[in-house]
Amino acid sequence: MPALRLILVLLCSLSVFYRILSEITSLSIFRYLDEIIFFSVIVYLLFYYLTSKKVHIINLILLVFISYSVIVSLLFGFNKNLIDIFLQTLINVKFFILIIGFILIFKNNFKYLNLYFKVVFGIAFLSFFIHIISGVQFNNLFNISTFARPNIRYSGFIAHPNHMAYLAVLYIGYILSKIKSSKTKINLNSFLQIFFCVAIIFLTDSRTSIIAAAIFFLAFYWDLLLKNALVLLYVFSTLSLSIVFLAVFTDVFDSIIQNIFQTFTLESTYIRGNMIYLSGLIFYQFFPVGTGAASFGSVMANNKVYEYYEQADRYYFANDIGLYDSNIASIVGEYGFIGLIFYFLLFFYTYRYLAKTFRTRGVMLKSVFFVFLFYTITNPMITNNVYILISLPVFLKIASINNTNTL
């Protein structure tokens, strides 16, 4: 088991930075680390459950969902290719498979998980600082898009500003969880770390992450808010000043409002909004099962659904740009009302399994799950390897934060 933990940590660390590694080396294996990790964990889980004969309810729900997805997609879906359907179904539950695997592999020994946490977050933060100093030269050197809005969005070696912003949000959640578990106040060291993460969020220009960070602070102060009017006034005043600052000195609210308005039309140039709107049409027209796996907003999808709604020739659809960015849109489109029920059960029982394994029900664990769910509106959280692999160590560490044997 120690060797398995070390190999998994090494592969995951490399996978998080695969874009940079693919640019600075000629090795193509970095592009396939996602698949190697995923199917290695699947093999481990199959071996574990066949030999231990222990089955949890989350495993049963996964098996039922996979069977349902394949059968219903073959009967009613737009894509009738069995291989596409099966592979896309596995991809659609990647997060749940990997988190179950991580729990079983690391629950009794966090030595290598702690190393993974320090290495990934340390390299990400250090490279972000280097990116700030070197500016666009960093982008040119490593062939990273500037993701300009309007000039440059910094990302470091993690190579995408949204990934970097989410990593900073997770670190804020981790720091606040440690403070809350120790029942102490935020000291200078913790404040500086949180301030650094907030600065990262603004420099990546990630609007979703601003709201996500606010959710963590709300969860952290929730008990005090209910008991102390002065703290409530302080938080309300800080929030109000922050909103005024953002409204006056940035275009965050203008862009959010514009994106919301562009969500309710097929003519929108905001692809996430377009996908969400399309998923709503599918939800209504193909109620309650959607258009099936590998048909809409997913890697294996063909053009049939897009052609059905006369969208296939548009730039984003013709070039596969931004079609996978909203997990909510993909789930609603491919699986409809019944799919939403399945995913609610998957998230609920995954949380229960994690909390039960580490015997914790803290508000910060609930908040990190809520933040993850919140991100699925505009990001591919349950299917994107980078999002998943930077989430898992934080989920497990927050869940086990009161267990002195593992930290």
Image (cartoon, rainbow, N blue to C red):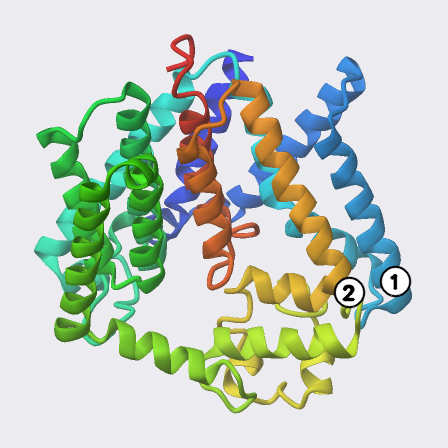
Q: Quadrant of the N terminus?
A: top right
Marks 1,2: beta carbons within 8 A: yes
Question: Could you tell me residue 4's position as x and y percent?
Answer: 54, 19
Residue sitting nearer the eye, 16 or 232: 232
As drawn, 75 above or below 218: below
SS for tag 1?
helix
Question: Could you tell me residue 286's position as x and y percent?
Answer: 79, 74
User: Tag on residue 26?
Assistant: none
- Residue 277 is at least partly visible in this image: yes
Residue under the image location 69 percent in, 57 percent down: 340
User: Tag on residue 292?
Assistant: 2
SS for tag 2?
loop
Residue under the image location 77 percent in, 23 percent down: 55
Residue under the image location 26 percent in, 71 percent down: 252
Q: Earlier in the sequence, mark 1 or mark 2?
A: 1
Badge 1 crowding class, 10 Å Cα cut-off, few under 14, some 14 to 19, many 20 or more, is some
Badge 2 crowding class, 10 Å Cα cut-off, few under 14, some 14 to 19, many 20 or more, is many
